Every structure is written in structure tokens, then in C-alpha cells.
Image (tube, grey):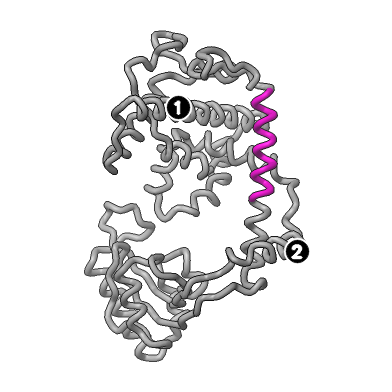
Amino acid sequence: MKSLIKVVLLALVLLVVSLAAGCGKTGGREVVAMVNGENIYSDELAEIVEEVKTAYEEYGMDFGGEEGAALLESLRRDILEQMIDNRLMIQEGKKLGSLNAEQVQEIMEPFKAQFTSEKEYRDFLAQLRLSEEEAAYILKLQDTVTSEVPVASEEEVRSYYEDNKEMMTNPERLQVRHILFFVDEGDKGYPVQHTEAEARKLAEDVIAELKQGRDFAELAREKSEDSGTRAQGGLYTFAEGEAVEAFAQAAHALKDGEFTTTPVKTEYGFHVIKREKLIPAGVQPFEEVRQQLTEQLTTEAKSAHFSSFMMEAKSKADIVNYLAEDGGNSSKG
């Protein structure tokens, strides 16, 4: 799923007056493509075009000149191809059976859990131009198509490790534990809302308990609002540049075994941090990366299998792309 948004966000597309050239028309709306009889309209494409163009202009990108216009037009065509693929995935997902509201939520829940807030999740779907129901059909399709792809074997994982040891080298990292209380007065979409004063007081209360001898990991599992580290007792390991500056500075200022005696404020809220140890740079042992590599190789195998499935589905689909290089049909893929 997330690969889809990368295509949309990284593409640079030009909104030109000639957008309608070569397009069909339905009920006054210009059609830029059809997928098994379903229309994709020029205004749908134009909306994405304008958002992407504006975003990149804010980073100083200039769309002027003939060369820029040609590149942007090419990428605009790529965006439409991705929209076609997206529509086809939804159609293929619906062939597996209808989903009711409860089933949609059941499918989306694990995916939704990857986001830090409801707002981030909703914004992601909005960028994809997908409803929850449409996203659920895509996820159902992916899960069904890849369900028989086996987990990467021990032999495959070890072979990959031996062939790519240079990629297994870690920079120096600092391992800490932390307890977080969010600061959110209803404007950030965090899972828990506190005023700044409330969050600071909660952090100060934790520090008081630590001074009385409470176990840090136990308190983190009990009270931290960071769902990503709470189950591990607040355990978090980071290299230079991977943590927000205030957090990193406070952690590095500690000695092993020490914790912060005043709350540390970051953009997320207030943290209490305990330094565990400094991990020197070096090649990670196989056992340390076995699970991660197993998941990586399995995911890659599933992705390749799903791509093959979609290529076949696209070859059989009735697709018309009015913006294709030939300016006409690209029926049957």
C-alpha cells in the first residue's frame, strides 16, 4: 500500500491547459482513462497534479522551460498509469466477494495501527484518493493472492546475510528506555490528549516513583503513551540523526543506568529517559537480524508474486488510456 503513495508524492506532474486533448467525454466530464468500463476523469488527475506541483514549488522546484514541461508531462502520464493500476486492484478485490462495514474495519485495523494518529491515517488515505472500503478491497486482494507464498527459509536468509554483510553494519547507537506523555490539546490527533501542564505533571510523577526505586521498564509498560515502545518497557535504540534533537541530547548527557530527573520536552510531549548502553558500530550478528531479514525476504517474495498477478490481470483487462504515448487505446494492458 505505502508504495502507492510514494508514486503519487514523488511524481512531478504539470497541470496544462491541453489536459483535455485526446480525452473522451462523459456527461460533460472529460475522461482520461477507462478500466473495464469504469472512468477515470481529468479533474481527478488534475487535483493530484495541482497538489504535487504546489508541494514541489514550495521546495524551490521550477517547472518552467521546455525541458521541465516535457519531464512533467511524462510523469503526469505515469501518475495516470498508477491510477489505472489502483482502480484495477479495487476491481480485482471486489471479485473476491463483497465486504460489509464490520469486515472493512477488521481488515483495516492492522494497517491503521502502523500510523501514529487517526489524522495521519486519514490523511494517507486522502492522498491515495481511497476510501476505507476501497483500501480494504486492495488489502484483501494482496493478502489472498500472496497467502501461499512461503516464509523465507533459513537457508535463504543465511545466504542473503553472507552475501550482504556490508549492509548489516550498524553505526554507533544509543540504547535507552523512555516514557512518553503526549501534549495534545485537540489539534494534533495523538491517541491521548493532555495539556502541557498535565503532561509535565505526569512525567514528574513518574520521576518521583523512579526515585523511590520503581523499575523503569515496569513503569514504561504501565504508563507510557508511546505504543511503539511501551510493550518493550520503553526500549528504544537510535543512531545519530534518528531521534529528535532534544531527546538525543538528553539521552547522551546521561551515564549508563541514569535517568532524567526533569521531564524532557519534544514536539511529541514530555519524556522521561533512562540510558541503557552505547552500542559500538559493527556488523550485526546473524541471530540479531534473522527475524528482520526473514520478514524482508518474505515481503519481497510476496511483492514479486503480487506484481506478477497484477501484470496478468492488466493484460486481460479492458483498459483505455487516452494519455498514452500513442494518444489512444492501450486495451488489454
Q: Is residue 169 left or right of residue 121?
A: right
Give the residue number, with chain letter if any, for mark 2: 154
Which quadrant of the figure has residue 168? bottom right
* Count of numbered badges drawn on the protein: 2
Please tell me in which quadrant of the rendered image residue 104 appears.
top right
Question: How busy is the neighbourhood of tag 1: few (under 14 within 10 Å), some, or many (20 plus)?
Answer: some
Of the residues shown, which amino acid type is indicated by label 1?
A: Ser
Residue drawn at 53 percent across, 49 percent down: 111
Residue 56: percent from left, percent from top: 32, 39
Q: Is residue 46 left or right of residue 4?
A: left
Q: Position of residue 200 (x, y in %)?
A: 26, 72
Mark 1–mark 2 distance (CA, rounded to whole Å): 43 Å
Closest to the observer: 212 or 60? 60
Q: Is residue 47 visible?
A: no
Closer to viewer: mark 1 or mark 2? 1
Q: Residue at x 69, y 48 (%)?
A: 301
Q: Nearer the viewer, residue 66 or 255?
A: 66
Q: Within 10 angstroms of label 2, few (less than 14), some, or many (20 or more) residues?
A: few
Q: Which residue is mark 1?
A: 74
The range drawn in magenta is 300-315
Q: Main secondary structure of the magenta part?
A: helix
- The location of residue 97, given as percent across then percent down, is 66, 31
Question: Can you say which quadrant of the picture contains the C terminus?
Answer: top right
